[in-house]
Amino acid sequence: MGQRQTRSDCTVGTLEKKNGLPAGTVRNPNGRDTRSDKQVGTIRKDSEKKK
């Protein structure tokens, strides 16, 4: 089976927990860890703006 993309309405905390990652794995561009209630879709949107 192929790997699926994470839903954009999933939060960072849920993503880390679901994939067995330690808290603070997902980071902001400045190096600080991302809030756990931030949605994956928002992170994707922000990264598209910077390109």
Image (spheres, helix red, strand yellow):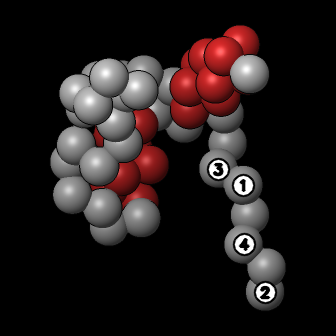
Total labels: the figure holds: 4
Residue assigned mark 1 = 5
Marks 4 and 2 sit apart, C-alpha to C-alpha, by 7 Å
The quadrant of the picture occupied by the N terminus is: bottom right
For mark 2, give the secondary structure: loop
Q: Mark 1 and mark 3 in contact (Cβ < 8 Å)?
A: yes
Q: Mark 2 and mark 4 in contact (Cβ < 8 Å)?
A: yes
11 over 51 or under it: above or below? below
Callout 1: 10 Å neighbours few (<14), some, many (20+)?
Answer: few
Image x and y of residue 36, in percent = 30, 30
Marks 1 and 2 sit apart, C-alpha to C-alpha, by 13 Å
Amino acid identity at mark 3: Thr
Q: Mark 4 and mark 3 in contact (Cβ < 8 Å)?
A: no
User: At 37% across and 27% down in the image, what residue appears?
Assistant: 28
Callout 4: 10 Å neighbours few (<14), some, many (20+)?
Answer: few
Residue assigned mark 4 = 3
Q: Mark 1 and mark 4 in contact (Cβ < 8 Å)?
A: yes
For mark 4, give the secondary structure: loop
For mark 3, give the secondary structure: loop
User: At 66% across and 16% down in the image, what residue appears?
Assistant: 50
Marks 3 and 2 sit apart, C-alpha to C-alpha, by 15 Å
